[in-house]
Image: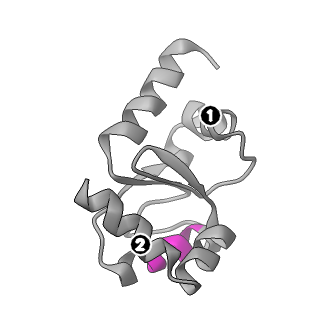
Amino acid sequence: MNPELKARIDNLVKQNKIVLFMKGNKLMPQCGFSNNVVQILNVLGVPFETVDVLEDFEIRQGIKEYSNWPTIPQVYINGEFVGGSDILIELYQNGELQQMVEVALAS
């Protein structure tokens, strides 16, 4: 990954308490997995930003290398990679996600 792309992704991850790299955006998710994550974050009622990887091929490929995670969507909370759709569903169901976002938003 080139330094410029790493800096762009670093900036997106660090400037937003919760950021979702997804296909589409929060108003129009373009895949079911991205939609799952948007719905979970909406239910929690927390502010979050989205990055549409379909609009930026460099980000689409780079985010996979950045996180060392092969699939999209990808969620970052407080600058830390949390996971994709399945992991967020699990964290939501066991109550851990709510705690994570509360801590992030309070910091």
Q: CA distance from mark 2 to mark 1?
A: 25 Å
Q: Secondary structure at mark 2?
A: helix
Mark 2 packing: few (<14 Cα in 10 Å), some, or many (20+)? few
Magenta: main secondary structure equals helix
| Residue 75 sits above or below residue 58 on the image | below
Residue 69 screen position, x and y as percent: 72, 46
Q: In the image, is 83 to the left or to the right of 96?
A: right
Residue 99 screen position, x and y as percent: 41, 72
- The residue located at (54%, 56%) in the rendering is 22
Choose between 29 and 105: the one closer to the eye. 105
Identify the mark at residue 66; answer none if there is no mark.
1
| Residue 106 sits above or below residue 102 on the image | above
Q: Earlier in the sequence, mark 2 or mark 1?
A: 1
- The residue located at (33%, 52%) in the rendering is 17
Which amino acid, mark 1? Answer: Tyr
Question: Where is residue 7, by image quadrant?
Answer: top left
Magenta-drawn stretch contains 69: no
Quadrant location, the N terminus:
top right
Q: In the image, is 39 to the left or to the right of 45?
A: right
Q: In the image, is 39 to the left or to the right of 48?
A: right
Q: Secondary structure at mark 1?
A: helix
Question: Where is residue 31, by image quadrant?
Answer: bottom right
Q: Residue furthest left?
A: 106
Which amino acid, mark 2? Answer: Gln
Mark 1 packing: few (<14 Cα in 10 Å), some, or many (20+)? some
- The residue located at (62%, 32%) in the rendering is 62
Q: Which residues are magenta?
A: 34-40
Identify the mark at residue 99; answer none if there is no mark.
2
